[in-house]
Structures are given as structure tokens and as C-alpha cells.
Image: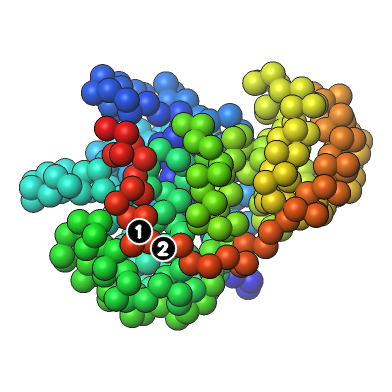
Amino acid sequence: MATRHISRWDLDKTYLRTEFATVRDLVRTALERADEKRTNPGAATLLREMARAGVSIHILSGSPEQMRRRLEDKLRLDGIVWDSFTLKPNLQNMLRLRFRALKDQLGYKLPALLRARTSAGATDACETLFGDDAEADAFVYSLYADVMAGRAGEELVHAIGERGRVYEDVLEDLRRCVRLVKGKAVVERILIHLEQQTPPSDFQIYGPLVVPFYNYLQAAFVVHEDGRLPSQGVLRVATELVTQHRFDGDALARSYHDLGKRGHLRGTKVSELAAALETWEEDGPIPGKEELRAMVERIPAYAEQAAKRYVPPTEAPMPDYLALVNKHNPRKKKH
């Protein structure tokens, strides 16, 4: 049996449209019923389509463990099936007077990611990681990728953790996990949802492995080229944007063009999208068919330009994590 590709997802501001700006926002978010929680446009469709394609789905969220039931209910309402679901033990942190840990993502997500890969029974599967620009996802995911690839070693990780004010026992857990790493590049792509409209250029420091995206059709284009999503899955995401969020064919195609200009697309598999649309049309009426057709007609010209600008994810030096660690959390910096 082939090893299943792994997709790891954050929830708040990545999958869900969550507000954190005020205490009132936090209280409202905590009290929302599952049917009141809003999903970012296209996110649920993309997640369902990746799962349907055989990708293993793992949720790693900074939401507190006390919200598990409502979050799981929300995912079930959206038709999402997952393989693991990890939430932050904030009550435990409070009881232990670990107040820094309530907002810290480095000391929470990096150990969780490494434990998942170094635990008994872990596979050598490659991964696609989804996060957002509201917290530390690009920093933590990129560091995780370099640790797994053997580029960031035990001493560097310890120094980063110290500078990031990670608790000592967590640092020891990190060092133990790093010692177990096999030194294989397993992170295929890091996709960062620009929920706060952060300029994509801000993420260039992490190299081409990190792909900032504005909408989930853009994410679908990337994972489609990576072979993790079939062509009809891309079309289903596009259909949702057309029928529920008023995208037209030009807006769909411009989503591709924007990624291509930034060097994130190879310009391949375009003909497969057109063929998939033809096959889908044979099965019956398609919502938003004319807009989908306009999209697949416009994309080939953009694909030629994308191919000239494409930068492979492997062609980049390792970021200076020690220099970045003090400003890796945009929300903390804003406050």
C-alpha cells in the first residue's frame, strides 16, 4: 500500500474566518455554535477534495482544547473527515501558570509537528502545510521543514527556542525530537492564507517553499500542480467561488496569473483542467459553467509566463531563524 500524502491544517484564519482583535471577539468565537462558524471561501471544498484524492488530513490548531466539540461539529457539518485533531492545552497551561504559552506558537506547534514525525509508526510521507499570516505559521512551518531536512540541527533549534522564550522542558522535548530526525526533506509545500492581507513579499525571506495565497483557488492551483489534487477538484473550488462569492471567469484566471507572476506555478497541467471541464460537462449541468470555461480559456497564456518565472522550492538558502525569531508572530508584534 502506497504511503499517503499528509496535509496539515491550522483552523483559525486559515480554515475558519475567526476574529481575535478584541476580548469581545474572543468571547464570541468561544461561544459560537458550530453552525454559526464561518469557513473561508473554498477552504472546505479544497479540504474535502484532497481527502477524496487520498490525502491524509491532520488538524493542528492553536484553538484551546475546550473548543474541541464545537470545532469537530463544524468540520462534520462541512463534510470533513480527519485522521488526527490536535488542539492547544490552554487550561493546563493556565493551571501551571504558563501564561507565555497561551499565545506562543513556536513552543506549541513545532514540538507537535516533530512528535508526529518521530513517534512510533510515523511514515516517510511528504507533507503540505496550511497556515495563515495572523500568527507564526510561516516561521514555524519553515523551521520544521529545515529540521526535518537535516538543515537545522539540535543546537540551532535550542538557540531559537531560548530566544523565543520557550519553556525549558519544551526545549528538551524539542532537542529529543530533533535527535530522532532522519534528515529527509518531507515538506513539499507551505501555503499561507493572507487573511490579514500581508504583502506576499514579506514571506520571501522563507524562500519559494512558502506560498502566500489570497484565495483557496490559488491554493488549489498549487496542490494540483504538485499532484495532490485532481483537476476536477480545482474546478469544484472554482465553482464555489463563482456560485457563492461572485467570482467571474476573469477573476478566476487572474488568481492563477497572480501566483504565476510571483514564481509559484510551473505552468503545467493546464490542458488537464480543460479536459476535466469537458468531461464534467458531459455528466450534466454545471453551476457557473460559463465562468469556468472562461477561466480555462484564459489560463494557457498565463501558464506560459508562469513557466518562465517559476522558482523550485528547493532552490533557497536557509532563513536566519535566530534573526527572525523575535518578530515571527505578527499578532504579538501588532499589539
Label 2 CA crowd tier, 10 Å (few <14, some 14–19, many 20+) = few
Residue 132: image location, x then y, percent: 46, 41
Query: What is the quadrant of residue 312 in the picture?
Result: bottom right
Q: Assign a secondary structure to mark 1.
A: helix
Q: Distance between the residues labelled 2 and 1?
A: 5 Å
> Does residue 51 appear in the picture of this structure?
yes
Are the residues at dot 2 and dot 1 in contact (C-beta closer than 8 Å)? yes
Is 145 situated above or below 141? below
Q: Quadrant of the C terminus?
A: top left
Q: Which residue is drawn at 80% across and 54% down?
A: 307
Q: Where residue 91 appears, x then y in whole percent?
A: 16, 43
Dot 1: within a 10 Å radius of its alpha carbon, few (fewer than 14), some, or many (20 or more) residues?
A: few
Please tell me the numbered disc located at residue 227: none
Residue at screen point 24% across, 39% down: 66
Badge 1 amino acid = Ala
Above/below status of 211 relative to 249: below
At x 58% / y 29%, what residue is drawn? 41
Amino acid type, residue under disc 2 in the picture? Asp
State the residue position of label 1: 323
From the top left corner, tell me how far across and down residue 204 is, in percent: 54, 51
Residue behind mark 2: 320
Q: In which quarter of the image is residue 30?
A: top left
Is residue 192 found left or right of 116 in the rendered image? right
Spot occupied by residue 23 in the image (x, y as percentages of width and height): 23, 23
Q: Residue at x 46, y 31 (%)?
A: 196
The N terminus lies in which quarter of the figure? bottom right
